[in-house]
Amino acid sequence: MSLDWSLLAEYAPALAHGTLLTIVLWLGGSVLALGIGFAMALLLAAGPDFLRAPIRCYVEFFRGTPLLVQLFLAYAGGPQIGITLSAFTVGLWGLGLYGGAYFTEIFRAGFAAIPPGQLDAARSFGFSRAQSVRHVVVPQIMVLVLPPAVNMLIVILKDTAVLSILTIPELTFQVTGMTLETFAFVEPYLALAVLYWALVELTALGGRVTEARLTHRLAWG
């Protein structure tokens, strides 16, 4: 059986639209996840004790349940308690909250890896606490957390495929529609695999370049 590559040209606009929406959801969800994770880790490290239990509950729930279940609960269960959200909003915040739970642990481990004595040493050289955190702690944390953070960004990217269940017209949804219209499966899903692979490789490359620059900057001040 020969493959009909002309299908990809015919559906190129739909695939391009789906790819663009996938990137938008991924970047938006990743920004939310990074922000949530950093804030939660900071509160665990230096916040009041009464916040630790709620933060741990958040982390354990979102790490311990599948993303698909979380999306269904928010999208279908929300109206039951008077909260109706669009599929796009549920997908975006679903990725953000799901990824944020993992980033909380990534940043928490980064904070824990920095010896407390480094802050005291920086203060002895005349740095303020804010300057010590900015110039001593944060650069080291960034180098430590970058590899697992990039891996998590890749996971979030691939998890955008789950959002097709909510009928969000991202890349996987477009490919599924293509298969239903043409009854072709190999060409559409091969294109899907190649597009995701390309996005993942670009993300990994960006992570390697950033890590090299951060390491060089940390080594040479």
Image: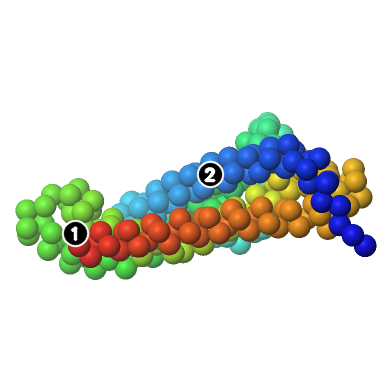
Q: Is residue 163 above or below residue 151?
A: above
Q: Residue at x 11, y 57 (%)?
A: 123
Left or right: residue 50 versus residue 123 is: right
User: Which residue is label 1 attached to?
Assistant: 221
Q: Position of residue 180 (x, y in %)?
A: 89, 46
Whole-percent x and y of residue 122?
13, 59
Q: Secondary structure at mark 2?
A: helix
In front of the other: 121 or 136: 136
- Crowd tier of the residue under label 1, counting other residues whose Cα lies within 10 Å: few below 14, some 14–19, many 20 or above: few
Residue 126: give its label.
none
- Where on the picture, by quarter, is residue 49? bottom left
Give me the residue at 58% from left, 57% from top. 200
In this view, the residue in front, 173 or 71, is: 173
Say if 18 sits above or below 189 in the image: above
Which structural element holds mark 1? loop
Sequence-wise first label, 1 or 2: 2
User: Tell me, what colour scheme is on the image?
Assistant: rainbow
Locate the N terminus and report the quarter of the image it occupies: bottom right
Q: Which residue is mark 2?
A: 27
Quadrant occupied by the C terminus: bottom left
- Residue 165 location, x and y as percent? 76, 46
82 sits to left or right of 121: right
Contact between labelled residues 2 and 1, with CB atoms less than 8 Å apart: no
In depth, the one of 172 and 30 nearer the eye is 172
Residue at image location 68% in from the left, 33% down from the top: 86
Q: What amino acid is labelled 1 in the image?
A: Gly
Local packing at callout 2 (Cα closer than 10 Å; few below 14, some 14-19, many 20+) is some
Q: At label 2, which amino acid type do we have?
A: Leu
